[in-house]
Amino acid sequence: MLVLDGKIASAAVKASLLQQTQALKAAGKRTPHLAAILVGNNGASETYVASKVKNCEETGFGSSLIRFGDDVTESELLAKIGELNADSNVDGILVQLPLPKHIDDEKIIEAIHPDKDVDGFHPMNIGRMVQGFDTFIPATPYGVLLMLEHFKIETKGKHAVVVGRSKIVGRPMSILLSSGHPQGDAHVTLCHRFTPKEELIKLTQQADILVVAVGIPEFITGDMIKPGAVIIDVGITRVEDATAKKGFRIKGDVNYEQAITKASAVTPVPGGVGLMTIAGLLMNTMKAYEGKFYHN
Ligand code: GUN
């Protein structure tokens, strides 16, 4: 059983990016810069954004963290995004989700210039991804592809079952795994909340590669896994636990103890896909800096 260790795979991506930023610095050039907008004080979002900023530092990227209170207006956010769009020293912009209910996520995402949309959420970039054009791939599915690449997991001709159809993980993941590239060419089944449970179990039991992104702790149990399958657990849910130092534990969508008795490879939680999401984001930020696909 192979542990698909996100620390190892993300360290390899970051080492290569660090080499590039060191070369830029040696040549007297500026390095890529990521601007992250954080609204309110959602504990999980705070942790994710702090980690994104820390990883920028470790890789020689510049970063700015721009904070707003829960009561920020849509027009204040749009004004800040306009400012960052116009700032030639900012290569990538991300707005951490979720946003408060009074803010229209779609409007905010569409305001980010597609050239700086390092989360890959802008409809233009999603459209490019669907058509197989070079673009920013949403950071989590991109991280999964980088993980599959690092551990040389074959996807071609395999049956990949994706559970969860979210805009930022499940849906793009299903498209990418079925597309024609080295970590694609799988035949893909996408299951979601309206897939009857008996049907879902039949499908997961046929999955050579099972990607789970539903946000329900330990949703996938050992009996739902095909012997020898590769299991990619995207879930990161905080579950209250009075015995834990922080008062909670992080749980994935897969029962890890059961999965390791059936699967050939499993991502741990924490320490799996979460770290790869950041690797994907950093790769996208370098790509934005290089202006590779819109500017030449
Ligand atoms: N919230 C949960 N995942 C993400 C992500 O990948 N990007 C942003 N901006 N917000 C998120």
Image (tube, rainbow, N blue to C red):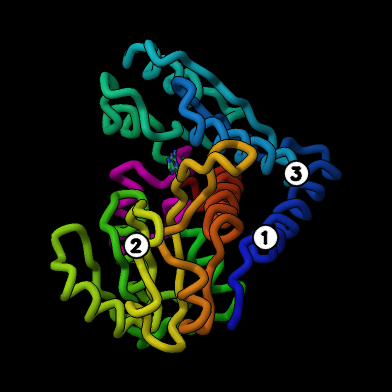
* Image quadrant in which the N terminus is located: bottom right
Mark 1 or mark 2, whichever is nearer to me: 2
Above or below, comparing residue 184 to residue 264 in the picture: above
The reply to whether the magenta stretch includes residue 233 is: no
Could you say which is closer to the camera, residue 102 or residue 138? 102
Task: Locate residue 23 relative to residue 208 in the image: left or right.
Answer: right
Q: Amino acid at mark 1?
A: Lys
Q: Choose the circle earlier in sequence order: 1 or 2.
A: 1
Along the line of sight, the residue nearer the viewer: 213 or 30: 213
- What span is colored magenta in the figure? 116-140
How far separated are the C-alphas under marks 1 and 2? 24 Å
| x, y percent for residue 89 | 62, 28
Question: Which numbered circle lies on residue 7?
Answer: 1
Q: Going from the N terminus, do you reach mark 3 or mark 2 first?
A: 3
Q: Is residue 284 visible?
A: no
Q: Examine the rendered structure and indicate whether residue 81 appears above or below residue 293.
A: above
* Residue 34 visible to the viewer: yes
Q: Residues within 10 Å of mark 2 (few under 14, many from 20)?
A: some
Query: What label does residue 58 carry, if any?
Result: 3
Q: Verify CB contact (< 8 Å) between mark 3 and mark 1.
A: no
- Residue 219 is labelled as 2
